[in-house]
Image (cartoon, rainbow, N blue to C red):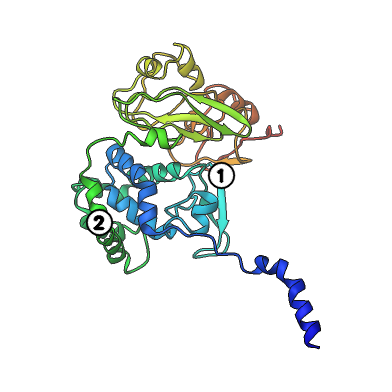
Amino acid sequence: MVRAQTLFLIMLMPFAGLFAQPSEHKLTSKEYVELHKDEAVVEMLLFGVPASITLAQGILESDCGNSDLAVYANNHFGIKCHEDWTGPTYTKDDDQKDECFRKYTTAFESFSDHSQFLKSRARYAYLFSLPRTDYKGWAKGLKESGYATDPRYTSRLLEVIEKNKLMVFDTQEEWPTSLGFRKKEAVTAASVTLKPVEKNNRDKKINLAPVIGPRIILITRDRSYIIARDGDSFQKLTREFEKGTWELPKYNEVSPKTSIIAGQRVYLQPKHRRGNSEYHVVKEGESLYSISQDCCIRMKYLLRKNNLQPGAEPKEGDVLNLKRRKKS
């Protein structure tokens, strides 16, 4: 009997490794800060969100980058889809079952969207009047503005900031020059000349022009675009991104003399012939052009799919087809 048991144990030995593998390494808060401190500083210099707040929120919301959302969707801040999101999504249980969360190609896109999310919501507007070194005011204001329902959210943010000494990043004035070389999706200051970046998406390589100045090149549905700033014009952007004089106006379907408004999307590549989803419900204040920009679909195809004539404008509540042509 003893011999039989011994033989059985010997036979199991080759399979022991299958049941005794070490668990996958999880990032610590220190490692998370080291990985993402440059992204947080770039966002602070571009949008005004203190780097300490961004890092602390990332640590809390993503469990130091170890959460399912961070690992599988590059979503470090728990931002849900909301009505204005047209990009990829990730579904998971949260306050309710099967909730929709935003999904990003890279962590840098998540950091950028987090800043733009705060900047574009009226309820957070007063926070941007605070000094960026006032991390305590920001932590308190985020909770009061409804960013999180946790009653301890302010104290938890402050604990993470002070334990990891994140406030040291709030005084940084220089653009992190290592970022553009360490991460392909990043940008640096005007003093740094970047080589053209290649981003592989759906087996297609997209050549992004060298970035001059603190620009962020964003990607939606494998198309690159920027968010316009004050003083931008097609003439200026043409020089900056080394494009032909006809390219940017054509990609954005406007005249070269059209004024560019700060905050709008400016595509660096042609938009698609169809949308990412089947339909779009028109919201207050939207125009056909703004929908074509947000959904990355060319105007003529948006018109064609909905049997509309040039110059037609939808009404709030109208349902527009983005993929298939509407039946007459």
In this orientation, which residue lies closer to the viewer: 98 or 133? 133
Q: What amino acid is labelled 2 in the image?
A: Lys
Furthest residue to the top? 245
Residues 271 and 201: in front is: 201
Q: Quadrant of the N terminus?
A: bottom right
Choose top left, top right, bottom left or bottom right for residue 47. top left
Q: Are marks 2 and 1 in contact (CB under 8 Å)?
A: no
Q: Is residue 112 above or below residue 208?
A: below
Q: Which mark is residue 88?
A: 1
Report the label total.
2
Is residue 126 at least partly visible in the picture? Answer: no
Q: Quadrant of residue 297?
A: top right
**Along the line of sight, the residue nearer the viewer: 155 or 248:** 155
Residue at image mark 2: 165
Mark 1 secondary-structure assignment: loop
Residue 182: percent from left, percent from top: 42, 37
Point out the residue furthest to the bottom here. Answer: 1
Picture residue at 60% right of the left edge, 35% below the top? 275
Pointer 2 or 1: first along the chain: 1
Question: How far apart are the two marked residues, 2 and 1, measured between alpha carbons?
Answer: 34 Å
Q: Residue at x 33, y 41 (%)?
A: 43
Residue at the extreme front of the image, as rendered: 3
Image side of residue 99 versus residue 216, left or right: right
